[in-house]
Image (cartoon, helix red, strand yellow):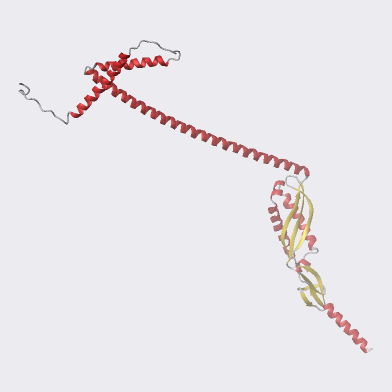
Amino acid sequence: MAVTATFFILVLVLFYLATSVKVVRQGYEYTIEHFGRFVTVAKPGFNFYPAFFYRVGRRVNMMEQVLDIPGQEIITKDNAMVAVDGVVFFQVLDPAKAAYEVSDLYTAIMQLTTTNLRTVMGSMDLDELLSKRDEINARLLSVVDHATSPWGVKITRVEIKDIRPPQDISNAMARQMKAEREKRAAILEAEGLRASEILRAEGEKQSQILQAEGRREAAFRDAEGRERAAEAEAKATKMVSDAIETGSAQAINYFVAQKYVEAVSRFAESANAKTILFPVEATQLIGTLGGIGEIAREALGRESAASAAPAIERPRKGPFEGQA
């Protein structure tokens, strides 16, 4: 009988010790209550708290968690109805506050995120809503994290998963995008044509400049040639004039022969003249050409005598020299 009582007491002691041991898994923390009042937090590992006097209040997940925000119908600032859904990433930093400052942590975070999602996105136009997701995420993160800080919770990220505008608005946006792309294509094509015309005009300008420079150079060369021809003609005329002053008849024959040859050449240049018959005495033409040659010889002889005269001075004859 005594053995049975001892064995029964030993079993009760072992059972009491077993119920007093609290083994906490990694990533969790337990709140410990003493007769219903929070006293401490049991960390991961082996913990011993006497049964009946202490009990586990809440088992708090200390890992980062993901909370899915269900789809919401939101009216934007420009009265467009869009469907939005997102996710919230959070982590409990203070298990006591998360357990005793709010009754249902997950529901509270979801409702808080949903209401702020409507507030933030409802204050924006549809275009801003579609193009500024990063700004929306940042604003939501700031607002929700500030609201949940008294609960011992840190909001790490808030992400908008999808924004779905109505079908008619999507079609209108597709047409607008197409029109914008066609506009940009037309602008680029016009700019290409403009650049092509400018390059072509520049090429024509350079070509005209080069042609004008060529014509100027040719005119300069022609003027120089005419100047030299005029100088030669003036020199020849002067030579003939000097010959006429000295009484040479060949000079007059030179001008007559020149005019004669010019008149004959005009007959030959006529478009209607096939055959020209006129009396020409060959001896007169030869004589005329001979007169021209004689003029040239006389002129060259005078020039050589004039150049040699200052160098050689002939002695003067005396009054009686040369008389027999």
Residue 99 in the image, given as x and y percentages of width and height: 78, 67
Q: Residue at x 74, y 62 (%)?
A: 90
Report the quarter where the N terminus lies. bottom right
Position of residue 277 relative to residue 195, above or below, is above
164 relative to 250 in the view: left or right: right
Residue lying farthest to the right in this orientation: 1
Q: Is residue 69 visible?
A: yes
Left or right: 125 in relation to 8: left
Residue 60 spot, x, y in % from top left = 78, 68
* Residue occupying the point 46% across, 31% down: 211
Quadrant of the rendered structure where residue 316 is? top left
**Residue at figure coordinates x 26%, y 17% from the top left:** 250
- Relative depth, front residue between 48 and 276: 276
Q: Is residue 130 above or below residue 228?
A: below
Q: Could you tell me which residue is drawn at 61 percent across and 37 percent down?
A: 190
Q: Position of residue 261 (x, y in %)?
A: 35, 16
Q: Is residue 100 visible?
A: no
Picture quadrant where residue 267 is located? top left
Q: Looking at the picture, does residue 106 appear above or below residue 313? A: below
* Quarter of the image that includes the C terminus: top left
Which residue is more in the foreground, 256 or 31?
Answer: 256
Count of marks overlaid on the render: 0
Q: Position of residue 314 (x, y in %)?
A: 13, 28
Above or below, comparing residue 318 to residue 134 in the picture: above
